[in-house]
Image (cartoon, grey):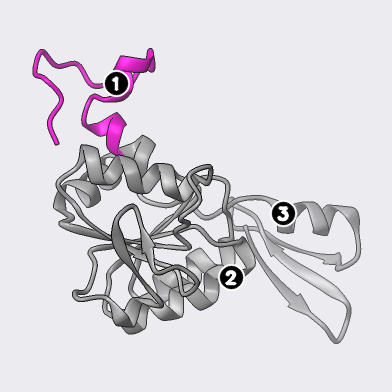
Amino acid sequence: MTTTDDTTAATVTTQLSNGLTCDLPASSPLAKLLRSQRTWVGPSAKERQAILRGAKSVAIVGASPNATRSSYFVGTYLQQSSDLRVYFVNPNAETILGQPAYPDLASLPEVPDIVDVFRKASDIPSVVDDVVASGATTIWVQLGIWNEEAARYGEEQGLTVVMDRCIKVEHARFHGGLNLMGFDTGVISAKKTGR
């Protein structure tokens, strides 16, 4: 479904998944419902696995020095359970998890392979611009954060976009770590979990 606003007639032209289009009053409950539906689909599980396996570094935008925040847990996990070089981006912090915090992506000592984002959904378009300017190729927006327009915009800018997925959970899933907590990861292996 694709929706475009026709402001002159106060209608919304909606393209359904079967290719048909229809015009709806922009203020109608159906138009509002269709705008809220998720139609963007990001990388498949195999593609996400390849992204993580190919990455050597990750920058966490919106990283927090607060041990109760999700970004702190993710940073801790990535430092301890992966071989990724982890950078923390927070203009209001000096250090996070014993490492320097950087004010922005442009200040990092290298271009990260993945930019993992802990920012509110409305901030994602500007983060996409920062990721593009930094030269990074993948933006990974954390679990619970969804901005479909930003996802499409990121792809238009040439980025690989992962959205509403936890990089910690995905990394553990693909490396056999979730089975230790009783999750069915779909990975069958007699090997010890690797970094």
Q: Identify the residue under disc 2.
A: 123
Q: Quadrant for the C terminus, please.
A: top left
Taking the spot 59% from the left edge, 61% from the top edge, the residue there is: 147
Question: Mark 3 or mark 1: which comes first in sequence?
Answer: 3
Q: With respect to residue 102, does 70 lie above or below? A: above
Q: With respect to residue 55, does 49 lie above or below? A: above
Q: CA distance from mark 3 to mark 1?
A: 31 Å
Answer yes or no: is residue 44 visible. Answer: no
Residue 100 on the magenta segment? no
Which amino acid, mark 2? Asp
Q: Where residue 20 appears, x then y in whole percent?
A: 65, 58
- Quadrant of residue 59 within the rendered picture: bottom left
Residue 193 on the magenta segment? yes
Left or right of 148? Residue 130 is: left
Q: With respect to residue 4, does 1 lie above or below? A: above
* Disc number placed over residue 186 in the picture, else none: 1
- Quadrant of residue 34 within the rendered picture: bottom right
Query: What is the magenta range?
Result: 171-195
Provide the major secondary structure of the magenta segment: loop
Answer yes or no: is residue 87 visible. Answer: yes
Which amino acid, mark 1? Gly
Provide the secondary structure element on which disc 2 rests: helix
Taking the spot 53% from the left edge, 74% from the top edge, the residue there is: 125
* Disc number placed over residue 36 in the picture, else none: 3
